[in-house]
Image (cartoon, rainbow, N blue to C red):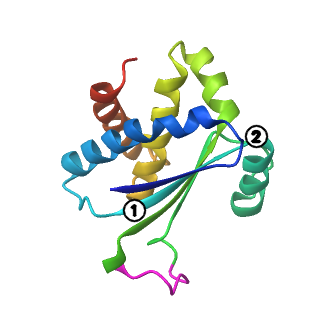
Amino acid sequence: MEIVIIDQTNNEELLKLDSYFERIADRTSRLLERAKDASLSVIFVTPEKIHEINTAYRKIDRPTDVISFAMQDDPSNIYVSEEENELGDIFINVQAIEDQAKEYGHSPLREACFLFTHGLLHLLGYDHMEPDDEKIMFSLQDEILDEVVQR
């Protein structure tokens, strides 16, 4: 899977996450029996930027940790065909990586990988709005992550 990482926060350490994200994407492709030739973008942003995105697109006036925009879900996107296999974009709030790692008692690496995995599953059509869907998605997150990065 091709993963393009864009860091809008000028933190070069974030670019080192690419090998972890590739392993997560490969594991996800194997577990879900999805094509490995897909592509996606990961954009690291500030809390202010993700707040702006959350307000504009979700009408929720606060920052969040991760937001995904799936290309195949947008019927108005005339530039992407199913054959191109462009999954979409994952925006990750860099401050949430640090804050949530402390809150949940694990490493920033684990949190960054968790947010990527969560976003990737959203791009692949998973959601957690209903309790049954949440069980499925959160179970998959653990199954994918536990092999790649320690808790």
Residue 66 picture quarter: top right
Residue at x-position 53% and y-position 81%? 77
Q: Horizontal placement of 77 versus 57: left or right?
A: left
Q: Which residue is mark 1?
A: 39
Q: x, y percentage for residue 41?
A: 51, 57
What is the magenta range? 75-82
The alpha-carbon separation of the residues under discs 2 and 1 comes to: 25 Å
Three-letter amino acid code at disc 2?
A: Pro
Q: x, y percentage for residue 51?
A: 77, 48
Which residue is at the far bottom?
78
Nearest to N terminus: mark 2 or mark 1: 1
Seen in the picture, residue 15 relative to 36 is either above or below; the reply is: above
Q: Which residue is mark 2?
A: 47
Magenta segment, prevailing SS (helix, strand or loop): loop
Residue at x-position 75% and y-position 58%? 59
Residue 58 picture quarter: bottom right
